[in-house]
């Protein structure tokens, strides 16, 4: 080997050594939180995404809390990141949105959900969109929606009870999708030539996949699903523009009105991305919550008994037994709200919430450099035995006397701060009404599956097949033992 080659080799070795050193010891104007950056490039991605079926804090997180404390650094998919399991600091991260931190999603997510989706927008534009959407999912609007929600729950439960079994997550996702699509764009699957739900199904299959956009990959299918759904939404918006309704009947009308205003900051592209995200967020999350609540009730007969009593009492108090569910009744359901909070605490539907630092952040003597990513880890907060006694125990009663709305340092299932979930009330209405129809009219038992698979970044059920049967097929005094095979055979 000649001297030039030797020199080049030496330079390459020095460069690689320096690069590996920098990888392990990123630059920081202070002391970084403790942790390991893992292997060069890969970081600790593989360990992070190792699935578990336990409801507890994921082992990846637990091990690092024991080793480094509640706030630690790591590296995922080539990015340095700080993970916080500290309730105070996590709450602070949410409160400082737009000032010290900013909502952030990986580039592939932005590609899939749309460059103009609400999570990727900031400042005044985010505020304006959020107000628009809150208008749709606020109490006044939800009050009007109550009959449609009840009809959907009753209709679907009736259909499911005529089937051998249903995969509950998928079935409830379809139920909620139909409702949301009707509310947002007056879409009716039966009357439409194109199936919007199918586009979303293809989209979801590839949502968490390796980002390789070539035919045959799940990621490609996902992008195709999005493209098709966006095309359909665009066509629908165009049709509506050509044939405007006299009265504002859905979100499309609202968007069209807004687009016509001279001073609007809304564009058609933003409106369509918003529509896409609202449709997606509404059915993916709430269907998982409904699935989990149904599963928890099967496993906890006492909770089922108390819930059933609360809802049978609602029916008893009615002057007309056939009258529909009212807002007053909805607001009166104390135990139901406790049960919903306990379900979302344990379900940890959003197990990781991501932010980016806008400047250097000082925390307990450590510095998080500007531009770094921060992941808030709600499961660590929700499964903390210091706050929730026997955290793995499903116990709706633990919410007695506790705040049931909004976010706190110890409850962040719906996020917190400026990015607090705008669909919280919509999700709660759907869950409460579904549970009302379920416990007053049906029994159910698990046929297959029911495991919930988790990684610190994802929660998904592994096929929960449930058999529903109408209650009047059984003796009324068997309300509690819904899991009993004997009861179902009678
Ligand atoms: C049980 C059901 C639900 C759970 C657990 C849930 C959870 C969350 C969480 C944790 C966030 C905060 C994300 C962040 O800070 O980056 C969020 C935001 C959001 N959620 Fe939900 N969600 C649920 C239902 C819904 C529904 C039904 C809708 C639609 C109607 C919806 C639409 C949204 C939107 C648009 C945002 C972004 C808000 C913003 O950026 O300001 N969610 N959700």
Image (cartoon, rainbow, N blue to C red):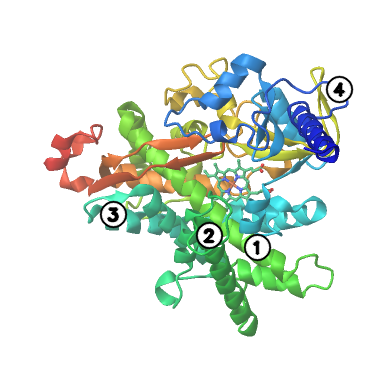
CA distance separating discs 1 and 3: 33 Å
Q: Earlier in the sequence, mark 3 or mark 2?
A: 3
**Position in image of residue 47 (x %, y %):** 55, 31
Residue at 23% x, 55% y is 163
Q: Are marks 4 and 1 in contact (CB under 8 Å)?
A: no
Position of residue 302 relative to residue 271, above or below, is: above
Q: Earlier in the sequence, mark 1 or mark 3?
A: 3
Q: Which residue is mark 2?
A: 222
Q: Earlier in the sequence, mark 3 or mark 4?
A: 4
**Position in image of residue 217 (x %, y %):** 50, 58
The quadrant of the picture occupied by the C terminus is top left
Q: Secondary structure at mark 2?
A: helix
Front label number (2 vs 1): 2
Q: Earlier in the sequence, mark 2 or mark 1?
A: 2
**Quadrant position of residue 374:** top right
Residue at 41% x, 37% y is 452
Q: Which residue is mark 4?
A: 30
Q: Secondary structure at mark 1?
A: helix
Q: Which residue is mark 1?
A: 273
Q: Which residue is mark 3?
A: 160
Q: Secondary structure at mark 4?
A: loop
> Label for residue 325?
none
**Position in image of residue 416 (x %, y %):** 67, 37
CA distance separating discs 3 and 2: 28 Å
Q: Are marks 3 and 4 in contact (CB under 8 Å)?
A: no
Q: Judge left or right: residue 420 versus residue 222.
A: right
């Amino acid at each position: 080997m000649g001297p030039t080659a030797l020199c080049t080799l030496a330079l390459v070795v020095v460069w690689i050594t320096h690069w590996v050193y920098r990888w392990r010891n990123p630059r920081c104007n202070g002391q970084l939180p403790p942790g390991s950056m893992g292997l060069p490039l890969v970081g600790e991605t593989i360990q992070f995404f190792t699935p578990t079926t336990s409801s507890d804090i994921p082992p990846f997180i637990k091990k690092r809390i024991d080793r480094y404390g509640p706030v630690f650094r790591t590296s995922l998919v080539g990015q340095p990141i700080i993970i916080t399991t500290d309730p105070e600091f996590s709450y602070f991260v949410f409160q400082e949105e737009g000032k010290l931190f900013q909502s952030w999603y990986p580039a592939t997510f932005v590609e899939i959900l749309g460059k103009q989706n609400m999570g990727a927008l900031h400042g005044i534009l985010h505020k304006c969109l959020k107000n628009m959407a809150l208008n749709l999912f606020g109490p006044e609007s939800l009050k009007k929606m109550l009959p449609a929600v009840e009809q959907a729950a009753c209709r679907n439960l009736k259909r499911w009870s005529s089937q051998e079994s249903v995969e509950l997550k998928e079935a409830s996702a379809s139920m909620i999708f139909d409702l949301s699509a009707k509310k947002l764009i007056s879409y009716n699957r039966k009357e439409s030539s194109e199936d919007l739900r199918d586009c979303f199904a293809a989209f979801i299959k590839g949502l968490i996949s390796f980002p390789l956009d070539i035919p045959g990959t799940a990621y490609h299918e996902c992008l195709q699903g999005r493209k098709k759904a966006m095309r359909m939404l665009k066509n629908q918006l165009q049709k509506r523009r050509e044939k405007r309704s006299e009265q504002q009947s859905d979100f499309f009308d609202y968007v069209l009105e807004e687009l016509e205003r001279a001073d609007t900051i809304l564009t058609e592209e933003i409106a369509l991305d918003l529509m896409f995200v609202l449709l997606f967020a509404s059915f993916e999350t709430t269907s998982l919550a409904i699935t989990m609540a149904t599963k928890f009730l099967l496993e906890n007969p006492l909770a089922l008994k108390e819930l059933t009593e609360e809802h049978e009492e609602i029916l008893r108090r009615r002057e007309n037994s056939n009258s529909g569910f009212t807002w007053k009744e909805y607001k009166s359901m104390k135990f139901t709200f406790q049960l919903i909070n306990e379900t979302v605490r344990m379900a940890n539907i959003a197990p990781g919430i991501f932010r980016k630092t806008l400047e250097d952040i000082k925390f307990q003597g450590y510095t998080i450099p500007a531009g770094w990513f921060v992941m808030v880890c709600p499961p660590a907060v929700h499964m903390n035995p210091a706050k929730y006694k026997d955290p793995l125990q499903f116990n709706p009663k633990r919410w007695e006397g506790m705040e049931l709305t909004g976010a706190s340092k110890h409850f962040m299932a719906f996020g917190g701060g400026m990015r607090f979930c705008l669909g919280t009330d919509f999700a709660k209405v759907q869950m409460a009404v579904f549970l009302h129809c379920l416990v007053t009219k049906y029994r159910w038992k698990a046929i297959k599956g029911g495991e919930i698979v988790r990684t610190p970044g994802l929660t998904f059920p592994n096929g929960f097949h449930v058999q529903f049967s109408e209650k009047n097929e059984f003796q009324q005094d068997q309300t509690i033992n819904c899991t009993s095979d004997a009861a179902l055979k009678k």
